[in-house]
Structure formats: C-alpha cells, structure tokens
Image (cartoon, rainbow, N blue to C red):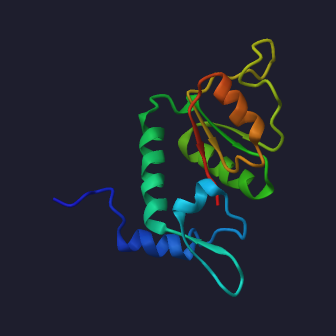
C-alpha cells in the first residue's frame, strides 16, 4: 500500500510551476538543511522539494487537527502575503490579520481585538516577529513559512 501523503508527480509539477523551489540569496543557518544547492550565476538558493513537501504535509496535519477553524489565525504584514492570507481564510473559515499587527492581540486581554487562537500561521517571521513572540508567551503553536 502506497503512502497517500507521498509526493506525486502532479504535485511536483505544480510546485515547480509555482517556483516553490526558488529561495533567496540570503541563507540562514537554520535553513541550510532545506537548501539543495546554490545557483552559481545568480547566487539564489534552490530548496529541496522533498523536504519542503514533508514540512507542508506536517503543517497540513496540524491544521486539520484543530476542530474549530476559527481558532486558527493567519498573519501577514507583507503586501505579497496579504492576498494569500485572505484567500486561505476565505476557503478555510479561519481568522486572518492582513496588514499591520496590533501588539498585544494575543497577550493583552483588555484590548478590544484580543484573540485566543489555538494555532498561528505566519507568512514571514522576519517581517512579523511580534505575533510570533506573543504566541510564544501565550504557548500558541506557530507555523511559519520561510524562503
């Protein structure tokens, strides 16, 4: 019996067409295990699609384990990630914060916009360090997408 979560050829083609494998010129020490190699002409790092798929499947299993989709919050402070966060929230029924994150949303109970999510999804932890920090204070698991 084959693994239903294994990377299929159709999934691989879609990931390549979406340029999921293309990283950036800068590489963090924590990201080196996910880098396949570096292009000599442009200096861009190419990511290992197999490991990327494994982590995507792990993230999907974590998201599915949350019973109430409203307990999942997606955050994006970048222009490129705001549309993706909105579409994800629209299709799954989760909450989203697109644009500026107001500090204290997860830790300050007096605030009007106070939230108690069970899972936080962040499109770029370097752009949005405040929600990741507050999630750590409140013991909220975080899924962060990095390139």
Point out the residue furthest to the bottom here: 41
Going 41% across and 43% down the picture, which residue do you hit? Answer: 61
Name the one closer to the observer, 23 or 60: 23
Give the percent coordinates (x, y) of residue 147.
Answer: 64, 61
Q: Is residue 39 above or below residue 135?
A: below
Comparing 26 with 8, the one in front is 26
Q: Quadrant of the N terminus?
A: bottom left
* Residue at the image point whose x is 36% and y is 65% from the top: 7
Q: Is residue 133 left or right of residue 35?
A: right
In the image, farthest residue toward the top: 110
| Residue that lies at the very extreme toward the left in this rendered image | 1
Where 58 sits versus 33, above or below? above
Q: Is residue 41 above or below residue 55?
A: below
Q: Which quadrant of the structure image shows residue 71?
A: top right
Point out residue 16 in the picture as x, y percentages from the top left corner. Answer: 52, 75
Where residue 138 appears, as percent x and y from the top left, is 64, 22
> Could you tell me which residue is drawn at 61 percent across and 26 percent down?
117
């Amino acid at each position: 019996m084959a693994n239903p979560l294994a990377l299929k050829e159709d999934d691989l083609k879609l990931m390549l067409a979406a340029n999921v494998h293309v990283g950036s010129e800068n590489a963090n020490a924590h990201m080196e295990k996910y880098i396949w190699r570096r292009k000599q002409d442009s200096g861009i790092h190419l990511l290992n699609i197999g490991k990327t798929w494994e982590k995507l499947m792990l993230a999907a299993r974590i998201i599915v384990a949350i019973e109430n989709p409203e307990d999942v919050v997606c955050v994006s402070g970048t222009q490129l990630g705001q549309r993706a966060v909105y579409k994800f929230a629209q299709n799954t029924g989760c909450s989203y914060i697109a644009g500026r994150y107001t500090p204290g949303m997860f830790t300050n109970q007096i605030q009007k916009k106070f939230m108690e999510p069970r899972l936080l999804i962040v499109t770029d932890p370097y752009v949005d360090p405040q929600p990741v920090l507050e999630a750590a204070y409140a013991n909220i698991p975080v899924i962060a997408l990095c390139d």
